[in-house]
Amino acid sequence: MNEVRYAGFWIRFVASFLDTLFLALPVAIVIYFLSDGNWFDFAQYQQNMAYAMSGNASKALASQPQMSMKWELLFEVAVLLTTMIFWKRWRGATPGKKFVHIKIVDFKTNQDIDNKQAITRSFGYIVSTLALLVGFIMVAFRKDKRGLHDLLAGTSVIYTD
């Protein structure tokens, strides 16, 4: 029987970065164009970046870009559904996880996760984020490499090779 190798913080970080590029970014582009540019005030964002890059942080922070909550909610739901489709199709992996040879499994059985775990884990990301990212950082310090979202959903992330 093969020993389970838990995926640590950095490999999971790389997978998450790749998912942002190849999963969330394309969804964001589609939503932005569907909203006819009304989702996010990109011009204000560019102006703030120019202020920040010139060393004028106070001016950059004075006016934040406006965004439409309707389109933001659509984006979040679309990313959630897309992620869950990949988890189902690729047995616990997203494109980023697949690329680095890791996947999400049930912690106790090391089998595929079910829909309840997928949904709980997805909403667990919010909790992990709102907890000042501690929910993600704890992956680096636990022997089983589980984040808060993993603990809530009863999942772990393991190497597939």
Image: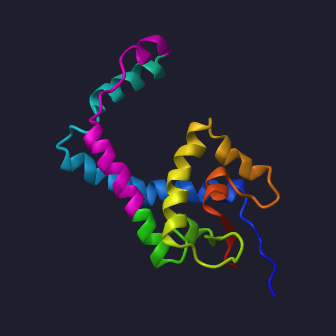
Taking the magenta stretch, the answer to whether it contains residue 6 is no
Task: Farthest residue to the left: give it.
Answer: 36
From this viewpoint, is residue 43 visible? Answer: yes
Residue 7 locus on image (x, y percent): 71, 64
Give how far across and how far down residue 50 sits, in percent: 40, 23
Residue in view at x 62 percent, y 37 percent:
131
Task: Answer whether residue 67 is magenta in the image.
Answer: yes
Q: Quadrant of residue 78?
A: bottom left
Q: Is residue 151 left or right of residue 66?
A: right
> In the image, 116: left or right of 11?
left
Residue at image position (57%, 41%) is: 129
Residue at screen point 52% across, 45% down: 126
Q: Which is the main secondary structure of the residues drawn in magenta?
A: helix
Q: What is the tally of numbered marks visible in this picture?
A: 0
Point out residue 32 in the picture as x, y percentages from the top left corner.
26, 46
Range of magenta residues:
55-81
Asked if 24 appears above or below 66 in the picture, the reply is below
Front one among 65 and 18: 65
Describe residue 42's horizontal placement relative to residue 150 as left or right: left
Q: Position of residue 16 (x, y in %)?
A: 55, 56
- Outermost residue to the bottom: 1
**Would you place residue 93 above or below residue 129 in this image?**
below
Quadrant of the drawing holding the N terminus: bottom right
Above/below status of 108 relative to 66: below
